[in-house]
Image: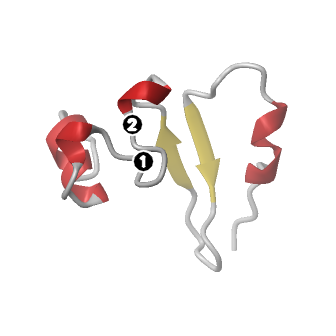
């Protein structure tokens, strides 16, 4: 099993937002890569739901497909 050196609890130590973050989920033997896809002004997003106006009623998967899955290597 892979044990990543990155601890997501340390993310606050970075001065600038990271473009890529890697971590593991529970007992998975895979590393998951998360990419910065958007920087949102706090006035443009609901602070509870973390959704913008055009995302209300959509699942996280729907939002991903609608806005970010634009190339052949994106998870669709």
Q: Is residue 49 left or right of residue 12?
A: left
What residue is shown with label 1? 50
Pick whichever, 58 or 66, lies toward us.
58
- Residue at the spot x=18%, y=34% of the render? 70
Q: Position of residue 43 (x, y in %)?
A: 43, 26
Q: Callout 2: helix, strand or loop?
A: loop
Q: Callout 1: helix, strand or loop?
A: loop
Q: Is residue 16 left or right of residue 55?
A: right
Q: Position of residue 46 (x, y in %)?
A: 40, 43
What residue is shown with label 2? 45
Pick whichever, 29 or 52, lies toward us.
52
Pick whichever, 21 or 43, lies toward us.
43
Residue 72, visible in the rendered structure: no
Q: Position of residue 53 (x, y in %)?
A: 23, 39
Residue furthest to the bottom in view is 27
- Residue at the spot x=20%, y=56% of the render? 58
Q: Is residue 39 left or right of residue 17?
A: left
Is the C-beta separation of discs 2 and 1 under 8 Å?
yes
- Residue at the spot x=27%, y=43% of the render? 74
């Amino acid at each position: 099993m892979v044990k990543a050196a990155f601890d997501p609890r340390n993310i606050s130590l970075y001065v600038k937002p990271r473009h890529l973050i890697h971590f593991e989920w529970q007992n998975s033997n895979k590393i998951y890569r998360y990419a910065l896809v958007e920087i949102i002004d706090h006035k443009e997003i609901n602070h509870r739901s973390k959704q913008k106006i055009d995302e209300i009623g959509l699942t996280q998967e729907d939002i991903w497909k609608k806005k970010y899955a634009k190339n052949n290597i994106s998870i669709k």
